[in-house]
Image (cartoon, helix red, strand yellow):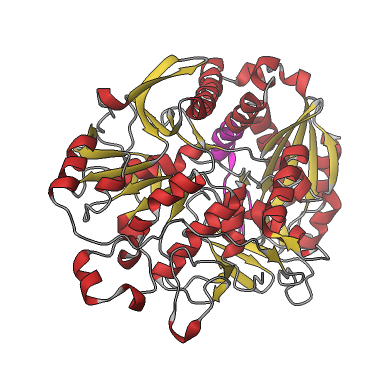
Amino acid sequence: MLIKLEQKLVSLEGENYGSYKQIKGCYNFEKFDLLIDYIQGDPFAEPSRVRARIKLTATKIPAYYYENKIREIALRDFLTRHFHLQAKPLSQSCGSGKSGLISIDLPQQQILDKTSVLIQGDFLDLRFVCGLPANGRRILGHAASKMLTQYVKQAVLSSMFFSAIDEDALKKHVHTAEDAEALRSELIKKELVGFIANGSKLARRSGIDDRPFQGDSIAFQSMTSLEVGLNTPHSGIVKGLGIKQGVTVIVGGGYHGKSTILKALETGVYNHIPGDGREQVVCEPTAMKIRAEDGRSVSGVSITPFISNLPLERDTDNFSTTNASGSTSQAASIIEAIEAGSRTLLIDEDTSATNFMIRDRRMQALIAKEREPITPFSDKVRQIKDSLGISTVLVMGGSGDYFKLADCVIAMDCYQPNDVTDRAHQIAQQFDTGRVDEGGESFGSLRKRSILQGCINSRQGKRQEFFRVRRTEEIEVGEERINCQAVAGLVHESQLRSAARAIIALSKTKNNQSFVGALESVERQLELQGLESLSTEAFGNLAYFRKVDLAAILNRMRNLKT
């Protein structure tokens, strides 16, 4: 079959690019089968989708590395990265557009459940793309033959078989993921929402580069008063800072690491690769970063716990807008996160609406409560914990109004934490603000919503189902563009592709559906059938997303009607 593919490709030399469709099919390469599933329309279009299917026993990879779900995900992540390293030097431009490309959906710092490599029954399925060579729109058959029968073969043989793998590196990769998962499972037992191991290096290269800082980086070291030890299967007891359930306030001077520690917790819902610096930084799995988003859409959310008595008698129990203010958007995001099942809120003063976070005594004196629709978060944060059991981690640099409300206050000094809870409480008593609590006796009621049939439409022009993603910033479904920049739980564009496919599936529902029920149905589908169930075709660029992140995406749809 290998010779047959070579002959086919050589015979297509100089033909119109569309003739490449003749090679679609399955070819035996002795140690694996090569499946060409999709042929691109031209050299500049999305590359052709290709798979290598290998008997799992033929890879000689010990069953130890895939005998449970966490190990299997880590193994597949490792193999994806290994294939990328082997294919990269073989991927050489040899014509127009993407000619000569050999590429796989490369993970970043997180170890995600992805479809780039799958274990399906007795087989290992490697999924990647190839740019079939052309000069203009004319096939370069000899170059295509060399790419598919030599370069691809070499990349597969040197990456998917145990004899070509550094077992120490593989073992470290798998054990790192398994230890992180164990740490995360320990959080509930210890009544924690987050954990940062001693020795962790949290600094990143930049705000848009999540890789570890290249220069000297300060190793994190917990203070004794908040240090805990958590059990792991491979690293024994790991000690570090335990962030307890409740209200935690992180303070400190500018550039001393407040936002850095919050960012580490934000991404701690995922496992990280060895060498990242945050391998043993974990967070409660449903944690959501909340921020102000001027201009975002809100549909049928009860924001009354935070905002009521609006001018012109606007309804805040069933509030909708296509252009929310900073405070309104932040209030809606908190209610939406609670509805979706988040148990931990992460909030940074720098990305919050000031009038939502605080309302001091002077402002209370000038603007009476009956003239101010907004109840500040400072008057609700305790109720969120005491009534709903939801914890909050707050970064504050400019207001001490949260000191008396906090169960724990951590001061960051040169990237190192200090427990200043007692001192903060003393200061709160010594310097009484004199402000009046405006939060009332309870948090307020939460409204159940249903998604109205037909409001989600995946049709664009003549295409019945259309979607497109732009990095982790935007999903386009049908005629609608959804801004996802503020959804911090989305760390890879493959998560957006999967979420878009889930949204398209929800669009086919023929009746109104409970918002929470829709989320839970998608979650069950992924648990029982996996990411593969989101598509009838074999795509290698899908990745797991959390239920709370899907909720955040849906809530930002301007066409959403509830």
Q: Where is residue 456 in the image (x, y as percent from the top left)?
A: 71, 69
Q: In which quadrant of the rendered view does residue 257 lie?
A: top left
321 above or below 279? below
Q: Position of residue 506 (x, y in %)?
A: 75, 60
Image point 39% across, 47% down: which residue? 209
Q: In which quadrant of the rendered view does residue 235 lie?
A: top left
Q: Does the magenta stretch include residue 293?
A: no
On-image quarter of the N terminus: top right
**Number of numbered discs:** 0
Image point 64% across, 63% down: which residue? 468
Q: Position of residue 254 (x, y in %)?
A: 19, 50
Residue 346 vs residue 205, the one in the foreground: 346
Q: Would residue 445 be found to the left or right of residue 358 on screen?
A: right
Q: Position of residue 13 (x, y in %)?
A: 77, 54
Magenta residues? Answer: 80-101
333 above or below 456? above
128 above or below 131? above
Q: Which residue lies furthest to the bottom in this view?
A: 312
Q: In which quadrant of the rendered view does residue 293 lie?
A: bottom left
Residue 154 vs residue 174, the one in the foreground: 174
Visible residue check, residue 298: yes
